[in-house]
């Protein structure tokens, strides 16, 4: 039943405009409410929902006022009251209401702009060089980015669809033949056919009252290769260390051997020269000066063995010349005597030994030493003017020790009996010192 | 250097009595004459050979050849003291270094102790199997061989001494027997 209004609107153009206005506000209020729900901003609904109802009420009022009737007395009474209000007041109310709606829409738009959406999260993830996978056990993959998909294709040859299966493959499952799984610093690393290395790390992260498994695949190619280089260097250093230890042991053994040999030679030399001098003195006699010199030499020998620190250290050649002079023997040297060690010590030892043999076996009074130097060898030839041996000379005692000394220094020694007894020694320019 | 010092110390220790004797002869109040020099030569020859044996003993064995060389050289210098000497040897081989050194020390000690009155000495060395026999024939006045042993006594061998004396002639037979299996 239609009830005609008491005061129908007589300026319908304005009311029509306000009616359309109210309709738009109503539609905007509905949209705002929906957007707020999507944004999960439930607190603002207290403003948006009343606007929907008010806008709907206004729109209905305006429509019925323009038509000039209502369908109930209450509505008619309410409309009569509204219609009786001044037009400017109604228009101002509509404008204020629309302004409020604009503010609400603006707020929603601003919020949309500031807020990170799921899409933006996915977009950001896809742009990451690190592979990211989030999955909940028993559920399909929640999040996977391009890098992880690509990584999965490279190692398994399939698309990543099941997080758990993929993780099992990573942890020890089957990979494509070109891929290899290594452990670096206690962490699992997968090396791809293109030589890139990927570190896999897994962790549990809380997400909306649940626990989600997050798998990260980070490219550590440079670190991996540097680590490999370091490991190779470490291995080389370790091997070098072992070799050095071996060399050290050999050096210690060699040094000990040489020291023993030197001790033998030294004692042999000291005692041998004294014995020869005593024999010569006792058999041939000598002056008091010669005797004094002999006594001095004996004192020195005894002091040397008794650890007397006052023993005078003399040049080896000087000692030999002095000793030869004491024994009435001449040493003729052609060429230059080596002055660097160990050559000096070896040549001096050889002179001493040949001196002893000249007196003892050859009964001569001159020892000739002929020294020459080639590009990288020092050669010394020893001969004497005594009785030459007729048989092969057996090396023992002094000659044997001399040969050992020369061989240890990397040199050689030859003994010839015919035409004259000749001892030839050859020493390399670069001798192994340690004597 | 440690090795070398240790060796010199060892040689000094071994040759201490001889070194002391040489020192005493060199500083003798009434001067060091030819007799003393000859005696010094005997002592020095011993030091030389004994130290050589000590250094060679590192391998654990010493050859009879080395012992014969040492005895020959010692006798060579004993001759300077006016003693008639002779040495001979039968057999070769190697024996525990301690045993060979003990043999040389015995020969040297007997020679040194009898040197003042010694006029003749013949040393014969015979090696056969595990035995090394040293037979010494001496002619010396008032010489009594004492088998007290400050000489080297080592594990691995046994020593037996047999002495026969008639007037000034004395025959001392030292038998050294290597214990255990021959290497």
Image (cartoon, grey):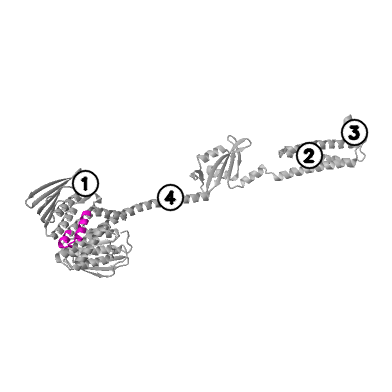
Q: State which chain disc 3 sits on.
A: A
Of the pair B158 and A435, the residue shown nearer to us:
B158
Residue named by callout 1: B154
Give the label, 2 or 4, closer to the camera: 4
Horizontally, residue B27 falls left or right of residue A23, namely left
Indicate the quadrant containing the N terminus of chain A: top left, top right, bottom left or bottom right: top right
Quadrant in the picture for residue A316: bottom left
Crowding near the residue tagged with mark 3, few <14, some 14–19, many ≥20 C-alpha atoms within 10 Å: many
Of labels 2 and 3, earlier in sequence is 2
Mark 2 in CB contact with mark 3 (< 8 angstroms): no
Residue at mark 2:
A29
In the image, which is nearer the foreground, mark 2 or mark 1? 1
Above or below, A407 against A140 in this view is below
Q: Using the numbered discs, state the Cα–Cα distance from disc 2 to disc 1 in whole angstroms.
A: 120 Å
Q: Compute the Cα span from label 1 to label 4.
A: 50 Å
| Discs 2/3, front | 2
Residue A290 placed where, x, y %? 20, 67
Where's the C terminus of chain A, which quadrant? Answer: bottom left
Q: Which residue is mark 3?
A: A69
Q: Earlier in the sequence, mark 2 or mark 4?
A: 2
CA gap, disc 1 and disc 3: 145 Å
Range covered by the magenta-colored residues: B16-39
């Amino acid at each position: 039943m239609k009830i005609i209004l008491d005061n129908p609107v007589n300026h319908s153009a304005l009311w029509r405009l306000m009616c359309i206005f109210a309709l738009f506000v109503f539609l905007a209020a509905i949209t705002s409410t929906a957007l707020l729900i999507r944004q999960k901003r439930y607190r603002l609904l207290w403003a948006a929902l009343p606007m929907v109802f008010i806008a709907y009420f206004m729109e209905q009022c305006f429509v019925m006022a323009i038509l000039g009737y209502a369908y109930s007395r209450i509505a008619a009474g309410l409309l009569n009251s509204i219609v009786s209000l001044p037009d400017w007041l109604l228009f101002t109310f509509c404008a204020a209401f629309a302004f409020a709606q604009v503010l609400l829409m603006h707020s929603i738009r601003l919020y949309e702009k500031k807020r990170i959406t799921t899409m933006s999260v996915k977009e950001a993830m896809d742009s990451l060089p690190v592979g990211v996978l989030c999955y909940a056990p028993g559920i399909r993959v929640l999040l996977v980015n391009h890098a992880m998909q690509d990584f999965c294709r490279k190692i398994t040859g399939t698309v990543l669809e099941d997080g758990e299966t993929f993780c099992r493959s990573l942890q020890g499952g089957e990979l494509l033949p070109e891929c290899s799984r290594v452990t670096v610093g206690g962490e699992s690393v997968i090396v791809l056919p293109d030589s890139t290395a990927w570190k896999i790390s897994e962790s549990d992260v809380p997400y909306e009252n649940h626990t989600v498994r997050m798998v990260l695949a980070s490219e550590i190619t440079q670190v991996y290769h540097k680590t490999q280089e370091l490991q190779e260097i470490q291995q080389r250093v370790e091997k070098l260390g072992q070799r050095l230890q071996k060399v050290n042991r050999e050096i210690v053994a060699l040094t000990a051997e040489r020291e023993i040999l030197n001790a033998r030679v030294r004692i042999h030399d000291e005692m041998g020269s004294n014995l020869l001098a005593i024999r010569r003195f006792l058999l041939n006699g000598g002056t008091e000066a010669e005797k004094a010199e002999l006594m001095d030499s004996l004192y020195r020998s005894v002091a040397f063995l008794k650890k007397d620190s006052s023993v005078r250290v003399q040049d080896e050649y000087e000692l030999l010349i002095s000793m030869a002079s004491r024994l009435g023997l001449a040493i003729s040297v052609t060429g230059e005597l080596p002055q660097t060690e160990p050559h000096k010590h070896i040549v001096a030892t050889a002179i001493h030994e040949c001196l002893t043999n000249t007196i003892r076996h050859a009964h001569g009074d001159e020892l000739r030493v002929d020294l020459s130097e080639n590009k990288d060898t020092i050669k010394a030839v020893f001969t004497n003017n005594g009785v030459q041996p007729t048989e092969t000379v057996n090396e023992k005692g002094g000659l044997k020790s001399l040969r050992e000394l020369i061989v240890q220094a990397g040199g050689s020694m030859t003994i010839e009996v015919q035409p004259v007894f000749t001892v030839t020694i050859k020493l390399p320019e670069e001798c192994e010192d340690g004597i | 250097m440690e090795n070398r010092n240790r060796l010199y110390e060892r040689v000094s220790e071994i040759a201490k009595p001889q070194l002391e004797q040489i020192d005493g002869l060199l500083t003798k109040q009434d001067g060091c004459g030819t007799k003393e020099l000859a005696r010094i030569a005997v002592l020095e020859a011993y030091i030389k050979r004994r130290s050589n044996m000590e250094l060679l003993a590192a391998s654990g064995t010493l050859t009879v050849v080395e012992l014969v060389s040492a005895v020959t050289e010692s006798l060579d210098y004993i001759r300077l003291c006016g003693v008639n000497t002779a040495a001979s040897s039968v057999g070769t081989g190697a024996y525990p270094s301690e045993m060979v050194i003990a043999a040389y020390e015995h020969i040297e000690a007997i020679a040194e102790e009898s040197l003042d009155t010694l006029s003749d000495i013949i040393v014969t060395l015979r090696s056969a199997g595990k035995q090394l026999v040293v037979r010494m024939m001496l002619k010396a006045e008032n010489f009594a061989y004492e088998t007290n042993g400050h000489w080297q006594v080592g594990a691995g061998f046994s020593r037996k001494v047999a002495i026969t004396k008639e007037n000034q002639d004395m025959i001392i037979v030292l038998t050294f027997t290597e214990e255990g299996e021959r290497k």
